[in-house]
Amino acid sequence: MAKIAMITGASAGIGEACAEIFAKNGYNLILSARRYGRLEKLSKRLSNDYGILIQIMEVDVQDKEDVINNWDKLPEEWRHVDVLINNAGLSLGLEPIYNGEIDDWDKMIDTNIKGLLYVSRMVIPGMKENKFGHIINIGSIAGKEVYPNGNVYCATKHAVDALSKSMRIDLLPYSVKVTVLHPGAVETEFSVVRFKGDAGRAKKVYEGFDPLLANDIADAAWYAVSRPQHVNINEMLIMPTSQANSVFFNKESN
Ligand code: NAP
């Protein structure tokens, strides 16, 4: 069987772009997200275009039981994953700490930190057994610095950065590679989710400059995975040319 890549949050944005590039390179895929219809459509297209095998998983990574049950349902031969892309994640709201919605905080922590841990806990034992594997965690510029009103989202992405470093140490004896990708602004559904469906406000985030595209991050994931076995890319901080850090942009209107 061809190598297997498991991608969380494959129904949109960066996860969907990663699915495309790994499919193009002959990987069989496990694609997961909550929106099953989108996964089904993507899976049909990728298996037609690239002749690969795909398992789709309708899962909410916040829900430990859901993650475990879906993993247990996978056929045995699919449980030795070569590449895990921990991409499912979100930001909700952009409020100072004294105004933040506690439910939003819970969802970000449960998805970005706990969800990543639940999925990793399912996949890592197979990699350890094989003494082979590569985990790509999708962090953020928000995991390297903090920005006004980013508080809890930034904290979750700092946790992803810390977990990536920890994983690298714990998995060292088993030759499992760990890479964390930290993107700046990428135009996906991310801001529509952050602003709870307010497409107008979301669009403004990307006005006046060229943001990154989901494919730019998928390219970086593929670059990391396609290095020789003795090379690990520990991390990459990938920014639009017009973005210096999380607050300074070179926008046309400036
Ligand atoms: P996106 O277009 O909104 O995609 C997010 C993906 O995560 C969707 O497939 C969504 O699928 C999935 N997801 C969210 N909550 C989930 C849950 N509870 N269970 C399972 N899947 C869930 O956003 P994106 O920009 O591609 O984001 C991907 C990753 O990149 C995130 O970790 C984000 O924090 C990070 N990132 C994004 C940017 C940016 O500017 N866009 C910058 C830095 C880092 P369903 O809704 O179908 O479940």
Image (cartoon, grey):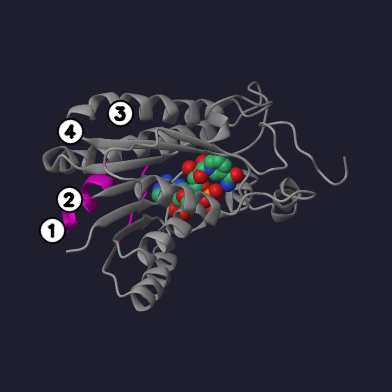
The reply to whether dot 2 and dot 3 touch (C-beta < 8 Å) is no
Residue at label 3?
Answer: 168
Q: Residues within 10 Å of mark 1 (few under 14, many from 20)?
A: few
Callout 3: few (<14), some (14-19), or many (20+) C-alpha neighbours within 10 Å?
some
The kind of residue on which mark 2 rests is His
Determine contact: label 1, label 2, CB under 8 Å.
yes
Q: CA distance from mark 3 to mark 4?
A: 10 Å
Instruction: Say which residue label 1 marks.
Output: 77
Q: Disc 2 on helix, strand or loop?
A: loop
Whether residue 90 is visible here, answered yes or no, is: no
Callout 4 secondary element? helix
Residue drawn at x 85%, y 47% is 252
Q: Which residue is mark 4?
A: 174
Circles 3 and 4: CB distance less than 8 Å? no
Give the SS element for disc 3: helix
Q: CA distance from mark 4 to mark 2?
A: 14 Å
**How far across and down, in percent of the image, does residue 188 sit?**
59, 54
Q: Are marks 4 and 2 in contact (CB under 8 Å)?
A: no
Q: What residue is rendered at 43% in x and 56% in y? A: 18
Range of magenta residues: 56-81
- Residue type at mark 3 is Arg
Q: Amino acid at mark 1?
A: Glu
User: Where is mark 2, residue-wise?
Assistant: 80
In the displayed structure, does residue 193 sit left or right of residue 65? right
Cα–Cα gap, marks 1 and 2: 7 Å
Q: Any magenta on residue 101?
A: no
Identify the image quadrant of residue 22: bottom left
